[in-house]
Amino acid sequence: MSETEVAHVVVLGSGQDAGAPQFGGPPVEITRTASSLLVTSPSGTSYLFDASPDIRTQSERNTFDPHRLGGVFLTHAHMGHYLGLAHFGNEAAATASVRCFGTASMHAFLTRNEPWRALFTRRHLEFGVLVPGVDVPFDESLTITAHLVPHRPDFTDTVGYVVTNRKTQGSMLYLPDIDAWDQWPDARRIVDSTTLAFLDASFSSGAELPGREIADFPHPLVSDTIAQFDTSPGQIVLTHINHSNPLGTVGADATDMAARAGFLIAADGDRYEF
Ligand SMILES: [Zn+2]
Ligand SMILES: [Zn+2]
């Protein structure tokens, strides 16, 4: 891969929706902002995957310009994944017609509910509806495809995104939230076809949320994800890590389990290329 052909990825945030530590929550060993990626094409155009509530901190740490984004791709309407859109509006960046993409259900949710609706009527953002499973070319080298995945449909459906670099034939999957791998028939086909897969690693154990039923927040455990993709040819990167999850902490069972499987654990500011 030549440097002029590769696409670059920055992990803007590696935490579950509320980050770590959480508002009102206990201290944590590893600080994480909410899940988000910035992908920059070989020609230098950057694309944001999810607009997290920590977008202000994330743009300051990683110097990306909201006015020059080639697109904002939203996975779904749980708080960690779209509240950052507010910072494109009048009180903040006040962007002009930045393109924003998601499913028809995401479009309906945002354009029917204030304050999100005003971002579109005032043309800070322009929405492009993506049809799941359909490849869409962006600039001269990237192709982006949304894939529907099973995840609590509170306000919208949920997608993961595959980004393919047509110059290197490398590809990346961003899939921060899914209820269970066995509810997604395309899991192996899609994960195994990508060179870099950022996958939901919210929890390591069902005992992480004292006083709350983890069954109310279904996610595969890290051990489920390892069992599912242990033999996948690409690099798996575990992300969307809940504040209660010791994954990444030195000496934690989950950290050792991931290392033995050859999986990487995302941290804010990590960089990859494909
Ligand atoms: Zn989430
Ligand atoms: Zn979610």
Image: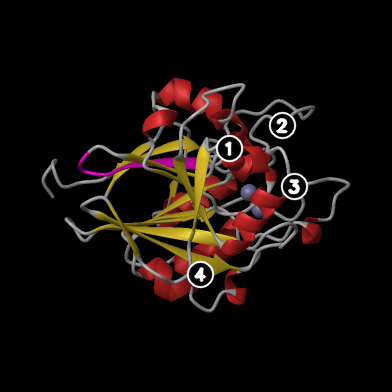
Residue at which label 1 appears = 52
| Lower position in the chain sequence, tag 3 or tag 4 | 3
Residue at which label 4 appears = 228
Q: Is mark 3 on a helix, strand or loop?
A: loop
| Lower position in the chain sequence, tag 1 or tag 2 | 2
Give the Cα separation between the discs numbered 3 and 4.
21 Å
Give the residue type that dot 4 points to.
Gln
Q: Answer yes or no: disc 3 within 8 Å of ligand 1.
A: no
Give the residue type that dot 1 points to.
Ser
The part of the image, by quadrant, that contains residue 193 is bottom left
Q: Which of 90 and 236 is in front in this view?
A: 90
Asked if residue 180 is positioned above or below residue 64 in the image, the reply reads below
User: What segment carries the magenta color?
Assistant: 36-43
Residue at which label 2 appears = 22
Residue at which label 3 appears = 208
How far across and down, in percent of the image, does residue 128 sit? 48, 55
Which of discs 1 and 2 lies nearer the camera? The answer is 1
Give the Cα separation between the discs numbered 2 and 3.
14 Å
Which of discs 4 and 1 lies nearer the camera? The answer is 1
| Lower position in the chain sequence, tag 1 or tag 3 | 1
- Residue found 60% across the figure and 45% down from its top: 81
